[in-house]
Amino acid sequence: MSVAHVDDDEEIQNPGEVYHVQKFFDNEDIYMGQWAHNCPNGHGKYLWADGCMYVGEWYKGRTNGKGKFSWPCGATYEGQFKNGYLDGEGTYIGSSNDTYRGDWVYNMKHGKGARNYANGDHYEGHWRKGQPNGKGRYQWDNGDQYIGHWRRGKMNGNGTMIWANGNRYDGCWENGLPRGNGTFRWVDGSFYVGVWSKEPREQSATYYPSDSQTGGLDWDPQEVYLVSLSDCRISHGEDIYVFPSQKTLNWPCEGDGKENDLRLRKASVGGYSLGSESDLSFDCGSECLGSGRKIDEGMVAKESDMLRGYRRPHIIIKPTKKQGLTISKGHKNYELMLNLQLGIRHSVGRFAPATSLDLKATAFDLRDKMWTRFPPEGSKHTPPHQSCEFRWKDYCPLVFRTLRKLFKVDSADYMVSLCGNDALRELSSPGKSGSFFYLTNDDKYMIKTMKKSEVKVLIRMLPAYYNHVRAYENTLVTKFFGLHCVRMSGPGQKKVRFVIMGNLFCTEYAIHRRFDLKGSSHGRLTEKPESEIESTTTLKDLDLNFIFLLQKSWFHQFCSQVDQDCSFLEQERIMDYSLLVGIHFKEISHSGEPLNTRANASEVQPPIGNGDQTSEGAAPCLDVLVNTNWWASVRLGSSMPAQAELTVRRNNGESLLVGEPTGECYDVILVFGIIDILQDYDISKKLEHAYKSFHHDPTSISAVDPIQYSQRFRDFIFRIFSLDI
Ligand code: ATP
């Protein structure tokens, strides 16, 4: 790779090429190194005006890869970075020799790691979100040590405490204290075994003297709580006070929608005042273990506190509502609905020989398209009806019949849902395309009216779509079940084309929040205050205040499926699609308030019976024990257990796409899928792109070409979905 050198005041001719630059920013930051696409890319060194420094790899303006970050106090971190975060393996050495060597995720100690505290204490084991969690050994500098299980920075579960004098306690722990069955042994061989509790009246155990001992026990087990455990304090250690991800950067990073003018940007980009920040140190987050033994609460609280200055975020969950307005007699679309139902009944109910999944090319041919006339008095092929006369057309009926078979939709059930006695519900135009949306009364199917151009796209891509959904059982792309057109008789009546698809939100869980996510920032904010967000409000990218943590097997499946689906859409030159995500919060009260927030992931438990998605004021969703049907219903994107971690945007009017994680997690069930896949990159999009590029950062607008679109979409999705370790 050839790298051209460019001085600070020289203009870069081709932003796509890699240059070697020296940049002196107005806020006195300095960057020296490789530069492409208007930001650091490759190897480079960045010096913040407050004395912090990063030397290492960059990708699209973010610290990414191997690097070293140093603070003016002398502390350093050397290791892996990802997307601006300490992430991967790395070593932190504090100014007072407090060190941590191990795994990091999102700036937090997470995974396996060893920490030496400045006072000589040492912990080695598992970490979760900055705290000892899982198996680990803590060694105090006075020689005491604990080997066993931890939870959220406290001894919890089975573990052994060995004091420097040789005495030991083996048994159960809860919240940092012996609790439950356990044995205390003296070095001389005597032991005391039974049930332990800090409450003297709950303590019940038997003393067994050693051979050398005579006489009874002159010892109170509460001494363990009052004396033995009070000796050693766990050091807080030293904390990192400014993380790279929270440092001000002088260029826009992909997806954050910042303006591109490097020269004019000031240090206030991230809302962080660096000068004052560098003077800060943290000594919070400690708690007492027993009487006086201090335990390190770890980084979680502290790292969340890094976001201080922002109001603690919280979510308000409102009861779920039935969506849409029932189309009854008198509604302007009443006749249209009747016609749709008559037409679908005619198409689906028609006798058809058993279909094979191997379709011939002629099945996709449009030449056999036929209009069927539906006179009110009936005809040879159509029943009499109460609506006005209309004509009806089915597109590729055999293909959709086979798709329904592939998607395991029973024809009789399909007809009952769509053309049974229940009326459809019309949604109040949720999209900006002008399409109308209708829902069947049982919520299973969604009908969307379409433009002629969208029908053309669907027909064009139908063979590839068919092959894709056939090849990938877990595909996230919308399931299409039928494509039809109605033309009512009479002057001025237009054709209404519509597609029938699966309603993603048809699950046994009440959906409390929904997000339509594209990975772009332009126009992607609903601007609704939290109090006005209803369960049916479709929120967008800039409203997103969660990242989603998936269990390992789901996560890998998810990533590979998103890749497959995006490649398919890219090949079909499709763009503008969204990932529609519905969230069900598992711990919700009658009033819709969350009952509980969790800082740790827990095992997923299935619901009993059906959560009532459609009732006014959803029932409390209590999780209870195993319901085998539930497990069978869990599929990628449908009723998937996950954790949703609340994020905050350090808001200075900046349109950051992904906020900083707060450590506040909720047990959730997720449903998601890729929708709106019928927009191809036609001339009008090219024009729109050319026009908008004059006014906005071209990467922030949604109309980019399909390859860029898919790349940006994936990048974003892989930032908001991550592995729950
Ligand atoms: P836009 O042009 O604004 O992207 P559009 O008119 O093309 O919108 P869609 O993006 O297809 O419409 O859908 C708009 C909204 O309708 C979505 O944000 C979602 O709330 C709802 N919706 C669309 N498809 C589905 C589906 N399959 N299941 C559930 N809800 C859906």
Image (tube, rainbow, N blue to C red):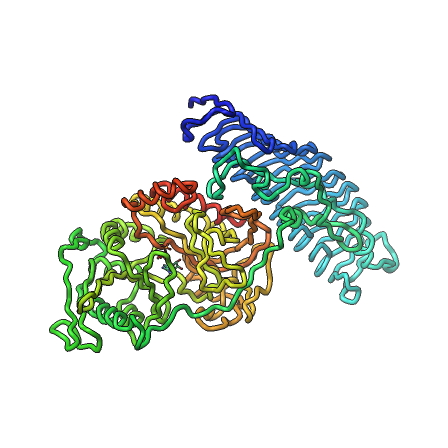
Q: Residue at x 23, y 62 (%)?
A: 484
Would residue 211 be found to the left or right of residue 328 on screen? right
Would residue 620 be found to the left or right of residue 515 on screen? right
Q: Nearer the viewer, residue 218 or 587?
A: 587
Determine which quarter of the picture holds residue 531. bottom right
- Residue 55 is at least partly visible in this image: no
Residue 377 position in % (x across, y down): 15, 77
Q: Residue at x 23, y 70 (%)?
A: 339
Residue 235 position in % (x across, y down): 74, 44
Q: Nearer the viewer, residue 230 or 236?
A: 236
Q: How many marks?
A: 0
Image quadrant of ligand 1 equals bottom left
Whether residue 154 is situated above or below residue 117 in the rendered picture: below
Determine which quarter of the picture holds residue 363. bottom left
Whether residue 136 is situated above or below residue 643 in the rendered picture: above
Residue 264 position in % (x across, y down): 53, 35
- Residue 90 is at least partly visible in this image: yes
Q: Nearer the viewer, residue 171 or 442?
A: 442
Whether residue 442 is situated above or below residue 273 in the rendered picture: below
Q: Nearer the viewer, residue 472 or 92?
A: 92
Determine which quarter of the picture holds residue 682. top left
Q: Residue at x 57, y 64 (%)?
A: 594
Residue 156 position in % (x across, y down): 67, 54
Would residue 563 be found to the left or right of residue 656 on screen? left
Considering the image in quadrants, where does the N terminus appear? top left
